[in-house]
Amino acid sequence: MIQMNDFRAEPEDLILAQAAAAERVIRSGWYVLGQEVKSFEAAWAARCGLAHCLGVGNGMDAIEIGLRGLGIGPGDEVITTPMTAFATVLAVLRAGATPVLADIDPATGLLDPESARRCLSPRTKAVLVVHLYGQIRAMDRWATLCREAGIALAEDCAQSHLASWQGRIAGSFGEFGAYSFYPTKNLGTLGDGGAIVTGRADLASAFGRLRNYGQSERYHHPVLGMNSRLDEMHAALLSARLPWLERFGARRRAIARAYRDGIKEGKVRMLAAPIEEANHVHHLFVLLCAQRDALLAHMKAKGVEAQIHYPIPVHHQEPCRGIARDPSGLPHAEEHARRCISVPCHPQMSDGDVESVIAALNSF
Ligand SMILES: *Cc1c(COP(=O)(O)O)cnc(C)c1O
């Protein structure tokens, strides 16, 4: 079976580097908010081209802390997409704010600025864009929309490590960018982890307090925060994995290029190609197919794992059925949820695996 991810096939050098990093932490005798976190934060901030990075517990907390750091909470509306990991919208709710769902662009699956405009109200405080599947697009349009509306731009970068738009990295367009280092992400640790990046020193210090019980200095708690810190162990593992991100990214890109060249469109269609290669880091390779159940069965029979990102749009999840949305409805998100299917696109795939996936799709 060609799997969606295959961590056991990772290079021996990487396994050894992680083992050395883990031993370094074990022998250091310091496990929370120490040198490993500082050093990874500095490295990740630099990769994003920003002054500040705060390591946190996971990607969902990164969004919540980001919004709370901006002062967004009860009574405030945040426009975002129904076609995302549930964590995106859950983070808005956890911050106490009200999500408002806009529709997607059917060509990419990304939030549609026109629909977002229809969702604006006097209570709107931010747009939370999600760089879904690894794609970043139209950041100039989002910046204009947010400036004109007088609201904040925030970025969910959980799927878009090092994706760039006109030379700038994901997370550097909004007031903050929220990253996840869940194992399957393009940069993942061996457990949960996350980070918030920002160019603003005032936000960075607010995020630093919020992740650590709202503490400003030892035993002083001017705000009610959370306990959401990136552990020293995960920071050290991420530092060991970071040098591989570029190489793994190049492999993902080569696989996506082979898919674009090899897959014959017909019953199965591809999403729009990125405008520039740098706009897409191929966290997932997603196709659209009206006969998706049959395609899933066919891929399984051909020995290829496939998954669906995402089968149920957020507004159909039980706790979110009453959620506010574009007054024109969310027809493109509905259709996308019925048709989307993801095929393996991970750095450990061989050329033979890539050929097999293409052959399986073309024989449908
Ligand atoms: C994974 C993911 C999250 C949540 O990250 P966790 O680290 O699992 O909390 C949020 N948004 C998107 C788009 C994701 O893919």
Image (cartoon, grey):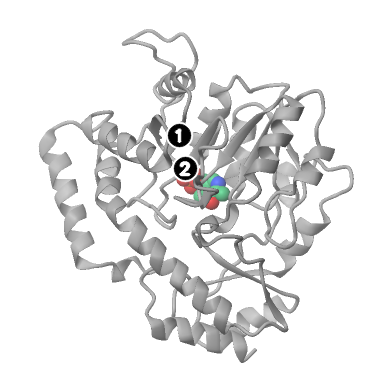
Q: Residues within 10 Å of mark 1 (few under 14, many from 20)?
A: many
Circle 2 residue: 179
In this rendering, the answer to whether 215 lies above or below 280 is above
In 3D space, how far apart are the residues under numbered discs 2 and 1 (Cα atoms)? 8 Å
Q: In the orientation shown, which residue stands out farthest toward the front?
A: 166
158 and 246: which is toward the camera = 246
Residue 86 on image: x %, y %:
61, 48
In this rendering, the answer to whether 110 lies above or below 44 is below
Quadrant where the C terminus is found in the figure: bottom right
Q: Does residue 321 appear in this view?
A: no
| Residue depicted at 69% across the width and 26% down the height | 151
Quadrant where the N terminus is found in the figure: bottom left
Q: In the orientation shown, which residue stands out farthest toward the left?
A: 27
Looking at the rendered structure, the secondary structure element under dot 2 is: strand
Q: How many marks?
A: 2
| Residue depicted at 51% across the width and 71% down the height | 256
Q: Does residue 297 appear in this view?
A: yes
Is the Cβ of the residue at disc 2 closer than 8 Å to that at disc 1? yes
Looking at the rendered structure, the secondary structure element under dot 1 is: strand
In the rendered structure, the answer to whether residue 94 lies left or right of residue 269 reads left
Indicate the amino acid at tag 1: Val
Q: Which one is closest to the eye, mark 2 or mark 1?
A: 1
Indicate the amino acid at tag 2: Tyr
In the rendered structure, the answer to whether residue 8 lies left or right of residue 12 reads right
Q: Residues within 10 Å of mark 2 (few under 14, many from 20)?
A: many
Quarter of the figure with residue 76: top right
Circle 1 residue: 197
